[in-house]
Amino acid sequence: MSARSPDRTDLKILDVLQQDARITNHALAQRVALSPSACLARVRALEQRGLIRSYRAHVAVDRIRSATIVMAQISFQKHALEEFTAFDRCILAMPEIVEASRVSGPYDYMLRVIVRDVHHWKDIARSLLSGDYGVEKIVSHFLMDEVKSFAGYPLTDDEPARG
């Protein structure tokens, strides 16, 4: 991976791709004022440097199946690396846990979990509490409405707010 920081053109490319990963190379090149071949070379370089990790579709899962989204705050009894590592392995193996972050503050992990219903969530919560991970407490929040979905990171400090 190159140690070179992304320049202004790289940042423009990354910003456009965060908003529309399906944009054609030709349209992307026009948006960032490059020739199509130079644009494609930059995108490939950004991928090779690990600045572009993947391309995904934002799927409306609630229109496909019954889905309840739970945001779960997980607290541990003690902060032992072995317990975090075992817990990480556990949650990586659970397809219902679609996002997990270890965080600082009053709890240790924040999970986003998709379940059929509250009974399904209770089964998962019980298994997390009863495992040998050191989980002390789980605080559950059921998603009512997604007001602002993740649409990408601001890539510079001087970007104007999007409306």
Image (cartoon, grey):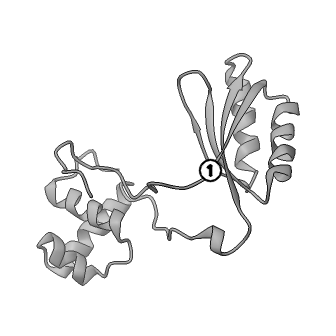
Is 106 situated above or below 51? above
Residue 20, given in percent of the width and then of the height, sits at 35, 71
The residue wearing badge 1 is 143
Q: In this view, does 54 lie to the left or right of 139?
A: left
Residue 128, given in percent of the width and then of the height, sits at 81, 37
- Farthest-out residue, left: 33
Neighbourhood count class around disc 1 (C-alpha, 10 Å): few under 14, some 14–19, many 20 upward: few
Is 125 situated above or below 113? above
* Residue in the picture at 67% in, 18% down: 79
Residue 64, given in percent of the width and then of the height, sits at 67, 75
Is 83 situated above or below 13? above
Residue kind at label 1, given as amino acid type: Leu
Q: Is residue 29 left or right of residue 96?
A: left
* Residue in the picture at 86% in, 40% down: 127
* Residue in the picture at 19% in, 76% down: 29
How many labels sit on residues? 1
Between 47 and 141, the residue placed more toward the observer is 141
Between 50 and 11, the residue placed more toward the observer is 11
Image quarter hosting the C terminus: bottom left
- Farthest-out residue, front: 144
Residue 155, given in percent of the width and then of the height, sits at 26, 49
The image quarter containing residue 22 is bottom left
Is 136 situated above or below 121? above
* Residue in the picture at 44% in, 54% down: 148
Q: Is residue 112 left or right of residue 2?
A: right
